[in-house]
Image (tube, helix red, strand yellow):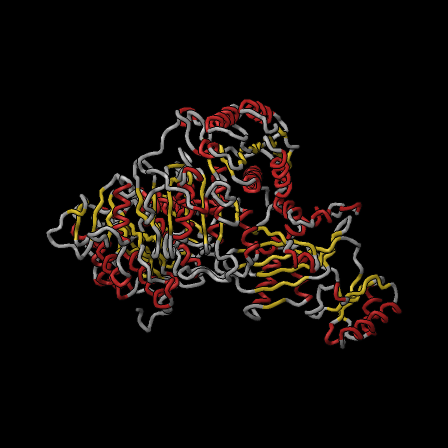
Amino acid sequence: MQTASDRHEYPAHWEADVVLRDGGTARVRPITVDDAERLVSFYEQVSDESKYYRFFAPYPRLSAKDVHRFTHHDFVDRVGLAATIGGEFIATVRYDRINAVGLSASAPADEAEVAFLVQDAHQGRGVASALLEHIAAVARERDIRRFAAEVLPANSKMIKVFTDAGYTQKRSFEDGVVRLEFDLEPTDRSLAVQRAREQRAEARSVQRLLAPGAVAVIGAGRTPGGVGRSILDNLRDAGFTGRLYAVNRAFPEDLKHLDDVPAHRSVLDIAEPVDLAVVAVPAAHVPEAVTECGEHGVQGLVVVSAGYAESGPEGRERQRELVRQVRTYGMRLIGPNAFGVINTSPEVRLNASLAPEAPRPGRIGLYAQSGAIGIALLSRLHRRGGGVTGDTGVSTFVSSGNRADVSGNDVLQYWYDDPDTDVALMYLESIGNPRKFTRLARRTAAAKPLVVVQGARHGGAAPQGHAVRATRLPHATVSALLRQAGVIRVDTITELVDAGLLLARQPLPSGPRVAILGNSESLGLLTYDACLAEGLRPLPPSDLTTAASAEDFHGALARALADDGCDAVVVTAIPAVGETSAADQALAEALRSAAAAAPAKPVLVVHVELGGLAEALSAAASTAPQPTDMAGPPPPLPASFERGDPHRPAERLPAAAEAPDGARLIPAYPAAERAVRALAEAVKYAQWRRDAADPGKVPEYDDIDQKGAAELIDRLLASGQGLTLGTDETCALLSGYGIGVRKALAAPTPDAAAEAARAIGYPVALKATAPHLRHRADLGGVRLDLADEEQLRRAYAELTEMFGKPEELRPVVQGMAPRGVDTVVRAVIDPAAGAVLSFGLAGAASQLLGDIAHRLIPVTDREATSLVRSIRTAPLLFGWRGSAPVDTPALEELMLRVSRLVDDHPEVVAVTLEPVVVAQHGLSVLGATVRLAPPPVRDDLGPRTLPVY
């Protein structure tokens, strides 16, 4: 696209799709010589006032010289970017490198003058703010550190773009012009501004899909049945409050309505605006439908058509082209291969999905990448005898299919400030951007519970159709990092629903103390054991005996809830012989009224074959609101969910007068283990919420030499793209961060070993450092406490006799460290998840059991404290079975220093300290390896972009 005389090739990596403030999208790309006609057309559509603000004088048209100047760039000292929709310019930005007196310059000059021009019809959409982020990133890449801009005082919109960006800036006024200068180095404020804009834009883009004013179903047939017609019928039957259209190229020209729904042969024939189009045509015909939607101004698409990336390489390329085409028109896409979307709000009543009945309205947001799992979840949440009634239903549902565009991250952005959603449930088969997902999850979890189950955990690859970044981290590590971010991680969809129902309408427990009461001693003991297994602190069960009446349950529950030593109550119940439905209802009312008197503590019910009580626990009382017409009658229970099946969904007990006083619903479970597991997750989440309120701080250390470490890293990397440091370089780099490594001397011969021991001083250790023996004391490759030369030479002979020649063993001599507990501290930068700090005890047992804890870098002091205590073998550090406790504060400081090293220098892509012997006083690092490489791209610090698949 550029001529041969240009200094740099076309920078394709600067191309990006962005979400604008109103939820639409635009394409950002470099301006080239081929854009002359587009530039002229764009300029003609700009008002005279905007032209005056740009050039400080009347400037009705661009001259040929102007067009040449604004389309010919060297992509170094002169760069222009354009925001495009439908291939046409809607805004431009350019910078020109200048010297100290404001004249054109080349490197090493590090300042540039920047200017914008936005088409009037697109002003107010956040286009200039997005372009500023991208042009700033380009400038930093070209070693420009500062922008200058001259703006007329009356151009308040552009002044606001600069001042609101969050960069460190300086303002002056001279000759009637405001001059702004600002550094381009990202600041905490600029990142906060960028992420707040990202949240608003992405949330708005999802909101436009879930609350459309008009929906067109493309591919709706004239006869019942078929995907398109089914979705059209579901939309109509749900009572969609907006305008609905049926579109099919095969309709006769004289067909005006399809079952009272306006019918058209093309979206272009619809006179009114269309916000959402559901595309249900064969994949080969989807491009034509997308083109017509784009030309009509449709805001978003739900593509249920299959035949894309899930079908193989040809389908994957078809999917890429679909995304490119959709984004060209500024639209967003759910799918392809999607199940659909649902919004139960009375103002919308949208069921643009293949679900024949929408779920009852409620406070749970549901996201599923899999259509089949989405069906299962909706079915469980819909079922009156095993699901949710009253207000504890679904607020919104999104099935993303291949999630080629809209993903779980986008939906999280929407749920974060959605007033209709109190709990978010997600079924994920892949996480396209774990770093961003973790950031969004942490923010969302601080406001409302987020429960996640991840499928395809052990398949080794993402499901077909899901484009995801490769991660080297095992699933257990990813799960630990999600938990650190406040995500409630569960293993099955049954647990997903169980936890969701508890969190939706019960308060969070203030601690792990659980009271157990009921009319069955055996069921109470089972519940007690389950609590212990889940790490809770159960109180002795209170057995009311099988003769207990509803009044007895009421009194016992009221007393338990009033006990300051109790944080939650589990009620267990079995039916009495000949018990009637009236008795069931009486018990349900008794539990409701007792729980309503103490609204600060959660209450759960475990029931076994309770006949009518199951219905009482999930059906509203006579004064409660009835299910809306949207829900329809509940479907019958399938055989797999008949009463007594421990795998059927948990149930709910609405309080009397649910609507007037906001009383809560009580969840009921058919098995003690399920109830206790859900409660345990709520306890852990509540503790995370309390900890998140005071996350701690990243400490400063006066002895850290950050500048010296940076110079050493630059010098070492100058010799290669990636390298594992030698012993001397490793020790030098770590010492700059206050991390000392106990010296080890090579011992290629017995005499060399003796000389090394004399230099170090006895007692010493003799170690084999060959890869297959390193850190494997259990294999016999280490000899400790060698008090003199005779013992050393004997040990040397034993090692060589057992394992081979010295050159194969690579023996070293090292001074003995004080006795303690052997541990391992590691840090690694994963291309998908980011920098991760790991900790565990040394030895094969910890590795086999997977007893390793993880935290995202940078680690705070509170996180370091919790990291040490989060492994199962942590008691060994705190005086287990009479042993002396070790110096865990020193261990925590070591981990904080490693975290600082990796956070300060992203070129440090891996650090391993093994073993770290933690003694009663202090610790010793006996082995260390460090790997350097050019830092991975940190897209979370760059400008806002949509994923490219």
Is residue 452 at all visible to an observer of this figure? Answer: yes
Eyeballing the image, is 68 above or below 823?
Answer: below
x, y percentage for residue 2? 31, 69
- The answer to whether residue 610 is left or right of residue 211 is right
Most foreground residue, 609 or 659? 609
- The answer to whether residue 128 is left or right of residue 791 is left
- The answer to whether residue 256 is left or right of residue 171 is left
What residue is shown at x 23% (from left), y 52% (from top)? 220
Is residue 120 at all visible to an observer of this figure? Answer: no
Q: Image quadrant of residue 743?
A: bottom right
What residue is shown at x 75% (from left), y 63% (from top)? 778
What residue is shown at x 59% (from left), y 56% (from top)? 902
Quadrant in which the C terminus is drawn = bottom left
Quadrant in which the N terminus is drawn = bottom left
What residue is shown at x 27% (from left), y 60% (from top)? 282
x, y percentage for residue 331? 29, 52
Q: Image quadrant of residue 110?
A: bottom left
x, y percentage for residue 588? 49, 28
Eyeballing the image, is 877 above or below 707?
Answer: above
Residue at the outermost left position: 254
Most foreground residue, 339 or 889? 339
Residue at the outermost front position: 578
